[in-house]
Amino acid sequence: MSTVARDASHDNIFKSMKDITFEQTISDQCGVTMNDSVEARAIAEFMSSKPNVTVTYQPALIRIDGHGKLIFKMDEIGNYLGREMTAEIFEVNTSTHYGRMVRVDDNTVILFGNMDDVFEYI
């Protein structure tokens, strides 16, 4: 059995404390942290092809971070995975998130980095 190394060429959102600057600004970022699983890897690989998305792999977790909003389409992810993906399976794999999460319908989950963008859904 061979082991495939993860692609380390992706940007990493984690920084050393010496490299962190604290600012009094509002971020437009949003994201999810997922337990490492077959489904989470497929979601991460699929989302990494989208603009303004950063995927960071940790030993047991995968972070998917974005600017503005992240749109997760279950049918697109399912096609990439090779089997059905539902919003419920997505939510089970998501251990935490930041930003405002809206489940638009059974096929679409959106994370917003800006609260003003959420108003059309509430």
Image (cartoon, helix red, strand yellow):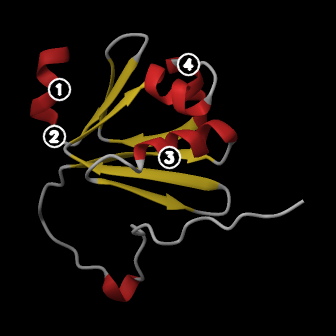
- Picture coordinates of residue 122, whole percent (x, y): 19, 14
Asked if residue 87 is positioned above or below residue 25 in the image, the reply reads above
Q: How far apart, in angstroms, are the residues tagged by discs 3 and 4?
A: 17 Å
- Picture coordinates of residue 98, whole percent (x, y): 36, 44
| Residue that lies at the very extreme toward the top in this rendered image | 105
At 67% from the left and 68% from the top, the residue drawn is: 5
Q: Residues within 10 Å of mark 1 (few under 14, many from 20)?
A: some
At 55% from the left and 53% from the top, the residue drawn is: 62
Q: In the rendered structure, which disc, 2 or 4, sits on the residue that comes first in sequence?
A: 4
Task: Give the foreground label among 2 and 4.
Answer: 4
- Picture coordinates of residue 24, whole percent (x, y): 12, 65
Q: How far apart, in angstroms, are the residues tagged by discs 3 and 2?
A: 22 Å
| Residue that lies at the very extreme toward the right in this rendered image | 1
Q: Left or right? Give the position of 73 relative to 24.
A: right
Which mark is on residue 114? Answer: 2
Q: In the rendered structure, which disc, 1 or 3, sits on the residue that comes first in sequence?
A: 3
Q: How far apart, in angstroms, are the residues tagged by discs 1 and 4?
A: 21 Å
Q: Residues within 10 Å of mark 4 (few under 14, many from 20)?
A: few
**Residue under pointer 3:** 44
Asked if residue 34 is positioned above or below residue 11 in the image, the reply reads above
Which mark is on residue 88? Answer: 4
Q: How far apart, in angstroms, are the residues tagged by discs 1 and 3?
A: 23 Å
Q: How far apart, in angstroms, are the residues tagged by discs 2 and 4?
A: 24 Å
Q: Residues within 10 Å of mark 3 (few under 14, many from 20)?
A: many
Which mark is on residue 118? Answer: 1
Q: Secondary structure at mark 4?
A: helix
Q: Secondary structure at mark 3?
A: helix
Q: In the rendered structure, which disc, 3 or 2, sits on the residue that comes first in sequence?
A: 3
